[in-house]
Amino acid sequence: MNIKHIFSVCLTGFVMTTSVYAQTDKSSTDYLSVPGPISFEKTDYNLVWTSHPLDNYYKQEYIERGDSVEKFKTLILLDLITGNTKIKDVVAIKIAELKKLKKTNPVVQFEVFENKGEYMLDFLVSENTPDGKLVSIVERNVYRYKTIVDNSGKKGVLLFGVSERSYGDDIDNFFAKLKTNRDDLINEVGTFKIPDITIIK
């Protein structure tokens, strides 16, 4: 299976991030040897869900105690694709996906940054109510991509991401805060010490 197909299936926006896989795989096997909790901005996030849908693709999600994968405030994710994948290709596929989504969703916004071989993608997506009249969920994501060699010598591209969600009546407040503190999350993700990875089968 080629990289484009892998990432169009596995690294789409926030709807695919949780709800689709949650219906097909409720595993919490720690494939990356990062059991958690992951401490981010003085908050602990516990491993709650994992997936290994392809031989070279791994996904793990972490949330605060009291939250759920279906309705969270903040979610930490680790995604890994192994092999000789080029990091630029991974980022380009995600950007192309967001551009396509933006054609039908005016809420979608994104910005990409590069720093010393790593890439960061800051993007905003949303979901409407079933009748399409109101925005029911807004999600802001900051993704950090880096090329890694795990502790067993396997190469790959690792994604460390933070997703923040707002629901219903709180969405206006979410946007107001975003105008004043947008750079905070970018800086936190960019300077975060990503845990060492060791892939298990």
Image (tube, rainbow, N blue to C red):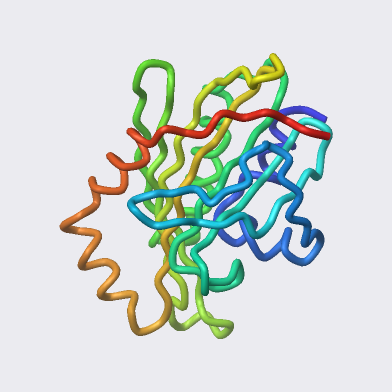
| Residue at figure coordinates x 46%, y 65% from the top left | 126
Residue 111: give x, y in percent of width and height: 35, 40
* Quarter of the image where one finds residue 81: top right
| Residue at figure coordinates x 43%, y 17% from the top left | 117
Residue 164: give x, y in percent of width and height: 41, 60
Please say if 106 is above or below 51: below
* Quarter of the image where one finds residue 198: top right
Please say if 37 is above or below 186: below
| Residue at figure coordinates x 42%, y 28% from the top left | 119
- The residue closer to the viewer here, 130 or 36, is 36
Quarter of the picture holding the N terminus:
top right
Residue 100: give x, y in percent of width and height: 53, 48
| Residue at figure coordinates x 50%, y 56% from the top left | 45
Please say if 153 is above or below 159: above
* Quarter of the image where one finds residue 154: top right
Report the side of 113 relative to 53 (left or right): left
Report the side of 176 relative to 34 (left or right): left
Residue 107: give x, y in percent of width and height: 39, 61
